[in-house]
Amino acid sequence: MAKIFEDVTENGKVRPWKERKIENVRYAEYLSILKFRRAHDVHGCGEVLRFRKIGKHLKLYQTWFCKRRLCLLCNWRKSMKNSSQLKQIIAETVAREPKGRFLFLTLTVKNVNTSEELKTPLRQLTKAFGKLSRYKQVAKNLLDYLRSTEITVNEQDMSYNQHLHVLLFVKSIYFTGNSVNYIKQEDWANLWQRALKVDYKPMVHVQAVKANQRKGTNSLQASAEETAKYEVKSADYMTVDDERNLSVIEDLEYALAGTRQLSYDTVYIFI
């Protein structure tokens, strides 16, 4: 008689492997309809799981995942892994610079409607952020950053919104009230427009993050989770409308090829 195992977190919460696998199979069927060559690999993602017994617990030691950018099973696992790694990185960063402060910055570009239009801004976003981080007004205060990309689908006109989530670690003097160091939201928007080289004012949002606050939108934990989350939420391409889903998946598969979702860097500043 087959025995059903449960993957339980340290807090006693059951991880939803079954639900994610069901979603993964549906995604594979969409890829098959669109004639993507790796549809078969996606369908077999996580089919075989091999465990080793360590003490009273079973530990997953071997399996095969498809690693597709939109695979719901792989994305779920990657998000958990990213979140865990970011917490370690943040802990090391704070230990190295205990007086540093955190900012959570969201940088956007205008919506686009096609896969071709989507692919260009995705590359433009990362290139422009590189410029932004090197501007003197930003660089003189910047110690570290974590950057991730996210794409959302606008239900009203089916356009795509691309934006960056950036967790910035800055020197404590950033908040001294000295206008030479502090950057207002309007100034962030101007700098971002300059980096993008666009003729419109892009939407920018910045807020201080409280490292000692465990909950709330301005807590460090919430900001880290926002940075580590899925590049595209499954709700945007796994709706009840199959025709819509096929169109969105085809666009995203093309646009995301060769791009990088998450990156982090340490800025060495010699004084």
Image (spheres, grey):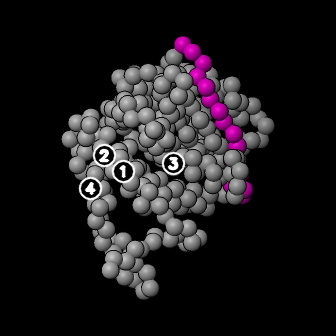
**Which residue lies most toward the top here?**
199
Identity, as a three-letter code, of the amino acid under mark 1:
Asn
The mark found on residue 28 in the picture is 2
The mark found on residue 24 in the picture is 1
**Which residue lies most toward the right here?**
177
Is 99 situated left or right of 5 in this image?
A: right
Q: Closer to the N terminus: mark 2 or mark 3?
A: 2
> At numbered mark 4, what does the secondary structure look like: helix, strand or loop?
loop
Residue annotated with mark 4: 44
Residue in view at x 26 percent, y 37 percent:
33
Q: Nearer the viewer, mark 1 or mark 3?
A: 1
Query: Which stretch did the figure color magenta?
Result: 199-213
The quadrant in which the N terminus is found is bottom left
Residue in view at x 71 percent, y 35 percent:
182
Disc 1 and disc 4: Cα gap in Å?
9 Å
Q: Is residue 135 magenta?
A: no
Q: Residues within 10 Å of mark 3 (few under 14, many from 20)?
A: many
Disc 1 and disc 3: Cα gap in Å?
18 Å
**Which residue lies most toward the left here?**
37
Residue 77 image position (x, y, % from top left): 43, 57
Q: Closer to the N terminus: mark 1 or mark 3?
A: 1
Identity, as a three-letter code, of the amino acid under mark 2:
Ala
The mark found on residue 229 in the picture is 3
Identity, as a three-letter code, of the amino acid under mark 3:
Lys
Q: Residues within 10 Å of mark 4 (few under 14, many from 20)?
A: some
The mark found on residue 115 in the picture is none
The quadrant in which the C terminus is found is top right
